[in-house]
Image (spheres, rainbow, N blue to C red):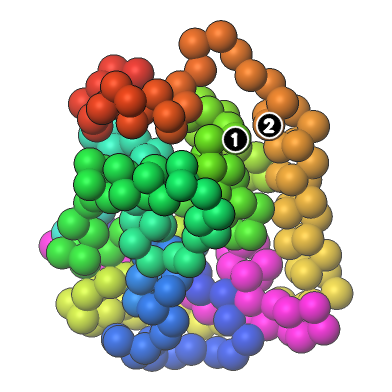
């Protein structure tokens, strides 16, 4: 299967380099892409800096792909990958205990895959995840929050083989004055919906991290589906 993907950047990248980049991204070291041209343009611009949406084709036929949104996974698997790579604010004993519990019970061997599909943890979405491990929001609220602002998914190349399957098709310029404003509006919309709707909308039966730990809930628990 041939898949078209896009990478937002401040420059044109004809040949992405395996092993290059920031190790503290959502899924560790890798080449981070999206399925949509528009999202890549948002990711590629700075406040006063134009960017590019680089377009590629990738042959997925023989790739070993981890889809964190597949039925066998839940949002806690995604969160555990994040906890393994991103620097979380751990202000309390509860948050530290939550991190340890999730890493012990929901860890995914993501480094063994050629590519990963999953949510992108932009600033707003990363703060939603932090609220969950701090016990502020429930499992249901975290799930719902990940759809606010329609950030979508990212496709991340992890292995050298995946990089070898990539073919550069070209690039489109992204104007900062248009696409940076769109990016900020998306983030602002997600935060507004979260604080004014989702964060305060507690429901009877909501599952919080304290209950998940106290009851030793595991990935196969029906309440996580």
Q: Is residue 53 magenta?
A: yes
Residue 224, image x, y percentages: 35, 25
Alpha carbon distance from label 1 to label 2: 8 Å
* Residue 3 in sight: no
Circle 2 packing at 10 Å, graded few (<14), some (14-19), many (20+), is: many
Residue 41 figure quarter:
bottom right
Q: Nearer the viewer, mark 1 or mark 2?
A: 1
Residue 182, image x, y percentages: 78, 60
Q: Please, what secondary structure does the residue beneath circle 1 have? A: loop
Kindly identify the residue that appears in the image at 57 percent across and 75 percent down.
8
Kindly identify the residue that appears in the image at 63 percent across and 86 percent down.
10
Residue 139, image x, y percentages: 47, 29
Q: Tell me the number on the disc at residue 136.
A: 1
Residue 100, image x, y percentages: 31, 49
Kindly identify the residue that appears in the image at 41 percent across and 50 percent down.
96
- Residue stretch rendered in magenta on the structure: 35-63
Q: In this view, does 204 lie to the left or right of 178?
A: left
Circle 1 packing at 10 Å, graded few (<14), some (14-19), many (20+), is: some
Circles 1 and 2 in contact, beta carbons < 8 Å: yes
* Residue 166 in sight: yes
Rendered-image quadrant of the N terminus: bottom left
Q: Is residue 163 left or right of residue 34?
A: left
Residue 48 figure quarter:
bottom right
Residue on which the image places disc 2: 199
Residue sitting at the far top: 204
Nearest the viewer among 74 and 213 is 213
Q: Is residue 113 above or below residue 23?
A: above
Q: Tell me the number on the disc at residue 6.
A: none
Q: Does the magenta stretch include residue 42?
A: yes
Kindly identify the residue that appears in the image at 64 percent across and 19 percent down.
202
């Amino acid at each position: 299967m041939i898949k078209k993907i896009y990478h937002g950047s401040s420059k044109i990248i004809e040949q992405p380099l395996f092993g290059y980049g920031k190790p503290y991204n959502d899924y560790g070291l890798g080449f981070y892409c999206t399925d949509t041209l528009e999202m890549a343009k948002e990711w590629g611009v700075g406040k006063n800096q134009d960017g590019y949406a680089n377009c590629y084709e990738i042959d997925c036929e023989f790739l070993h792909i981890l889809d964190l949104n597949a039925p066998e996974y839940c949002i806690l698997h995604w969160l555990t990958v994040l906890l393994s790579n991103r620097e979380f604010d751990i202000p309390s004993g509860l948050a530290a205990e939550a991190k340890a519990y999730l890493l012990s019970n929901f860890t995914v061997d993501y480094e063994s895959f050629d590519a990963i599909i999953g949510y992108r943890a932009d600033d707003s979405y990363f703060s939603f995840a932090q609220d969950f491990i701090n016990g502020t929001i429930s499992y249901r609220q975290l799930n719902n929050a990940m759809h606010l602002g329609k950030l979508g998914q990212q496709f991340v190349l992890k292995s050298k083989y995946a990089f070898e399957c990539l073919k550069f098709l070209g690039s489109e310029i992204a104007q900062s004055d248009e696409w940076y404003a769109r990016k900020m509006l998306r983030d602002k919309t997600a935060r507004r919906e979260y604080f004014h709707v989702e964060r305060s909308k507690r429901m009877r039966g909501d599952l919080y991290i304290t209950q998940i730990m106290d009851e030793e809930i595991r990935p196969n628990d029906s309440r996580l589906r």
